[in-house]
Amino acid sequence: MPKTSLDLMQGTVAVLILKALSWGAMHGYDISRSIRRRSEGVLGLEDAALYQALHRLERKGWIEAEWGLSENNRKAKFYRLSDEGRHQLQIEVTTWQRYASAVTKVLETA
Amino acid sequence: MPRLPARRLFRFPWRSAAQVAADVDEELRFHLDMAAQELIDGGWPQETARMEAERQFGDLETTRRVCRQLDVHKEKQMKWTKAFEELGQDLRFSLRQLAKSPGFTLIAILTLALGVGSTTSIFSVVNGILLRPLPFPEPERLVRVYPLSDAGEPSVFSVLNYLDWRKQSRTIEAASLLDTGSVNLTGTGDEPERLVGAWVSPEFFSVLKAPLLAGRGFAPGEDKPGASKVVVLTRKLWARRFGSDRGVVGRTVSLDGAPYTVIGVASENRWPASVDLWLPFELNERALEPKNRGAIYLSSVARLAPGVSMEAARAEARAIASRLAAQYPDNNTGYRMDMAGMQTYMVGDVRTPLLVLMGAVLFVLLIACVNVANLLLVRASSRESEVAVRTALGAGRARIVRQLLTESVALALLGGAAGAALAGWATRALVALAPQGTPRLEEVGVDSSVLLFTLGVSLGTGILFGLVPALRASRPDLSSVLKEGTRGSKGRVAVQARSVLVVVETALAVMLLAGAGLLLRSFGELVRVDPGFDPQNAVAFRLAPPSPKYEEDPQLRSLATSLMERMQKLPGVVAAGASAFGQPLDDNDFTLSFNVDGRPDAAPGQEPSMPVAAVTPGYFRALGLQLLRGRLFTEQDRNGSVQVAILTQAAARKFFPNEDPIGKKIALGWTSDGARRGGEVVGIIGDFKQSTLANDADPQLFLPFDQAPLGYLSVVIRSTVDLGTVAAAACTQVHELDADLPIFKLQTLEEIVSASVAQPRFYMLLLGGFAAVALAMAAIGMYGVIAYAVVQRRQEIGVRMALGATRDRVVRMVLRQGLVLAVIGAAAGLLGAFLASRGMRSLLYAVSASDPMTYAGVTLVLVAVAAIASYLPARRAARLEPQLALRADV
């Protein structure tokens, strides 16, 4: 992983997980790999932070967990979005986009 | 690639903390394994791949800890949420089930409500009166001290004997004598008012140790003659007459025409309960005169010194009493003293009736629980097939038990809530209805611990009798229950269990009925007693002429004369009279010793004595007393003419057993103006009840008021017109005569008679009410059992009828079942009643506690009720169509 990766801000991990799960149920390892793949390695999401965030989201009821079998037939914990989580994802995405575009505007005028 | 799990392994059941930890470990291990495999696939050496994966993961241990914590919390939260959801489900389902059988639900709730409500209210009253300590600091040290009468009853002190005891006693911390009487309050702008005053020692407030609201208690020396006149008000009087104004302390009020300075206001907790104000008892020359050692009229209250037992104090009082007896043989021959705890003394009279009521109400609670248990059992067996179906459809045993239990608990709670509401209402009603003079009534309120206890009992019944059938129903022999028409022996066992409950219930109801019946019979006897006077068409009231204005005999004579002149003019008057003492059945305790001229003097302390009253000539006719021999008093029996006296028949019989009392001279141990009071017996009148209807008529002696005036007047007016009109006119006349003379205890003689039996009537009504409730519950219980048995035996009955049994025969068969239960229950109940009724002997008048009439009547009532309760299902059984019954489901 290149050292140029950005440190993630508080709260961003949640939205990334929710987004990742919006494509379907996944286990932790898959979530980690798909975020890395899609951000093309730019976002340095540490796995420790990912798992803590997963369990926090589960506690909040935004995602639900279920044991299942992985592609290599091992017992793995699968996460999926709850209805509440899906709703939350929309809010987070909107907020994030407005935030990012505001920051972008400021940076471009400078 | 997102993938759905290949298949669902399991939905998380509740996990322990260890399981949660294992799950977290497993999840992380899976991740690390995958990451290590990825490294190996990318060419990383196999030996170190795992370590590298852990390094890339980050802080593994912190993550493990945080995840475990989060999951444990989540687990707990879900557990509670789930439990509440299920409870809600169960509750909703229960309420639906209960609403489906409104009859059962209503009866069960009403039964419990009656049980809980009546038990709580009666217990609250018993607790307030009998059990709760008096509202004074260290109430166990408060005692009533008293001399004993010849009959061994608590009596009263004379001033000197009290003072001698107080002086010699070492076991007492503080003591006060007590004399109650009336005092007229005038000059505060309002109408004159007759108040109840208590004359006490300066130490009085240190005996009770009740703090004052304002001002101070009495100081030493305020009982000496010539000390400034002071008064302490009760809070009640302070609020009523002085608008709760703290500035009243230091003000002067007029009592019996004399100025008194208010020095304090007492708190809510007061004693005696009936008083309005306290005054110092003046130890004047007259009170301390040695010859007045025999004038007994004082009560006493004392606080034991710390660490002194009542036994020690009692032993000391006995020793002092025998010293006093030896020292003053003229007055104190055989002098004895005793003491009792203040609370025991206070509640002595109501103790037995309250304990009887408490027993009665416990029975009602017991019957209520038995009945509800019975109802639950019947209901459970009728739902066996429903439960079997649910079990067959896969409902877990625990869930079914919980469901059935929720239902009974919901029922118990509903009944309990209704009972609590009933308890609040009933307690207030009891306090309002209780006869006047019941001690400590003002302290009675719904007792929360009692309410909790009875709610607990009702809940316990719900749980116990909900659980037993629930457990049984949840593991029924599925095939046998589902299979039509098959009943195991279990059904018969259940019927037997219910029959036992009904027998118990019936027995308890019989006991209550017997108790109520005894009180009813006793009350009937009591009101049939001839009082000896005519209570109809007469009204009475009292006057307490204040002392300075009416101190001297001539003043009292002219007051009585003008009063009687005015009373004669009232509308429709037949006769009017006044007595210097109380009305019959109200109170009269002015007892004097006497000698008959020509008989040898009796030994000191051994003189005969009887109650004495001074009356105006019209008094006998106003009361409607009968003249048996001789003559009544006339207007000619005046002060200065020959002194005369009239005896009641009881007095003549007791004191002149073998001679004619007419013409005999009686000399009383009462002197005034230097002359001995008494007179020549000129007439004998018929006996009448002076104290209570239940007691034998006391011997009594009457003197003409003009020859023996006393500062107290009870007026009786017999009239042919409406008594209300007469009473109003009498008040106007009295007011015209002296505007500062308050009228009190204005009531008809019928009201006086009725008030004198208020207490027995109250107990009779209460016990009767409970008995009625118990009977109704027993009837419901019996109906339930018989009706259920009929349903169970439907097929058998159908077969019998098909084989030719007539409807009458079927009715008889079912009736017999009910009557057998009733007879067994009644027999047990009569035995119980016979044993228990000994406890109520003191409440009965002219009826034996084992009165056969009552017992027979009660048995008859019960059998009749049982017959009705079983006839209804019997008739239903007889109407069965045999074909339908044979085909019917169980």
Image (tube, rainbow, N blue to C red):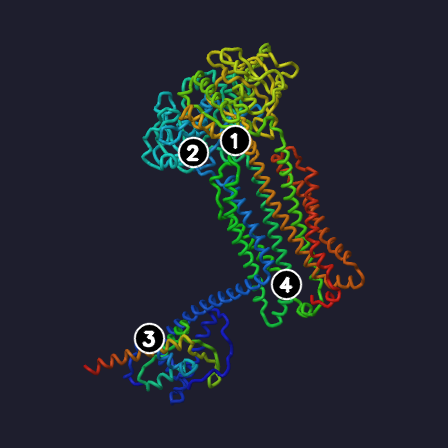
Label 4 to label 2, Cα distance in Å? 61 Å
Q: Which residue is mark 3?
A: A11
Give, as a three-letter code, the residue at label 4.
Arg
Q: Which residue is mark 2?
A: B208
Q: Which mark, by number, is residue B472? A: 4
Task: Output the chain of dot 1.
Answer: B
Task: Output the chain of dot 4.
Answer: B
The answer to whether mark 4 and mark 3 are in CB contact below 8 A is no
CA neighbours of label 2 inside 10 A, class few (<14), some (14 to 19), many (20+): many
**Element marked by disc 1:** helix
Label 3 to label 2, Cα distance in Å? 72 Å
Label 1 to label 4, Cα distance in Å? 71 Å
**Element marked by disc 4:** helix
Give, as a three-letter code, the residue at label 2.
Leu
Task: Output the chain of dot 3.
Answer: A
CA neighbours of label 4 inside 10 A, class few (<14), some (14 to 19), many (20+): some
